[in-house]
Amino acid sequence: MSNVYDSANELEKAIQESEEFKDLKTAYDKVMEDPNSKQMFDNFRNTQLELQQKQMQGMEITEEEVEKAKQVVELVQQHEDISKLMEQEQRVNALVNDISRIITKPLEELYGAQQ
Amino acid sequence: MSNVYDSANELEKAIQESEEFKDLKTAYDKVMEDPNSKQMFDNFRNTQLELQQKQMQGMEITEEEVEKAKQVVELVQQHEDISKLMEQEQRVNALVNDISRIITKPLEELYGAQQ
Ligand SMILES: [Ca+2]
Ligand SMILES: [Ca+2]
């Protein structure tokens, strides 16, 4: 019988100490330490965010924009440090999704059973 | 130094055993046990979901729909068991938001520091 906040803080520490998170931090710091890598990564991030926001607002995305986004992705995929960072981000995302699935189980079971 | 999955499972148990979650379950079961309450609640839920989906797809929401949604909300607010359930839902939502803020701290600190 542990307190929710104690357990959440425990989990936060476990995430921080996990191999997945440590590897992400290493990959992230490496990209951020090199001005060229950092700029390329920021550019990639901004392009993704812009498209996401447009999508969420129901705005049309032009063929030109799709093409530009593809080029930016191809560019960063060829950059060793950035592609390593993106790989680590995917690992951490998978971990976060797993965690989210585990801790929302009580609510899912409650709201799911009656339907 | 605990494992992420062990900690997540621990947190899930803590949520399940929390006063917030138990009270929600009690309120939810009470509404579901009464066919009239259940139908009113389902109707309310469906109206909310429809509007949310339209909003997410960038579709226009008519004045008529806004009016109808307001009426459904007013109706359920006057229903003692349903308004009790909605109150408990808000408490659990606040708890889940707190948890989410705690466990995403490592990622926020990593991605926030450089900006
Ligand atoms: Ca149920
Ligand atoms: Ca940082």
Image: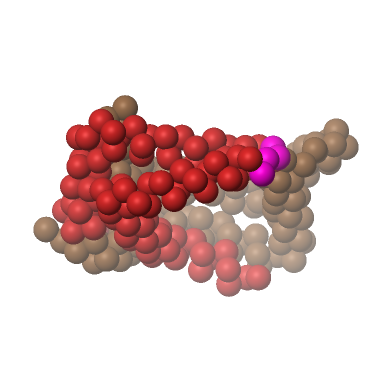
Chain colours: A red, B brown
Q: Give the residue displayed 43% in from the left and 39% down from the top.
A: A45
Q: Is residue A41 shown above or below B30?
A: above
Q: Which residue is farthest left?
A: B1
Q: Magenta includes A29?
A: no
Q: Nearer the viewer, residue B50 or B91?
A: B50
Q: Is residue A62 magenta?
A: yes
Q: Is residue A24 left or right of residue A64?
A: left
Q: Using the rendered view, name the quadrant where residue B108 is placed.
A: top left
Assign the N terminus of chain B to one quadrant of the image: bottom left
Q: Residue furthest top?
A: B115
* A43 w.r.t. B103: above or below: above
Residue drawn at the location 20% of the way across and 40% of the way down: A29
Name the residue rendered at 22%, 48% in the picture: A27
Q: Quadrant of the C terminus of chain B?
A: top left
In the rendered image, the vertical position of residue A17 relative to residue A1, given as above or below:
above
Q: Is residue A95 visible?
A: yes
Using the rendered view, name the quadrant where residue A62 is placed.
top right
Pick the front one: A101 or B15? A101
Q: Count how many numbered circles sit on residues in the image.
A: 0
Residue extending farthest to the right is B64
The magenta segment is A59-63
Residue A85, x across and y down, in percent:
29, 50
Would you say the magenta stretch is mainly helix, strand or loop?
loop
Left or right: residue B23 versus residue A35 is right
Q: Is residue A91 above or below residue B103?
A: below
Of the pair B98 and A90, the residue shown nearer to us: A90
Residue at 30% from the left image edge and 66% from the top image edge: B9
Q: Closest to the observer: A36 or A50?
A: A36
Q: Name the spot of residue A16 as percent of width and height, x first.
A: 20, 50
Is residue B90 shown to the viewer in this render?
A: no
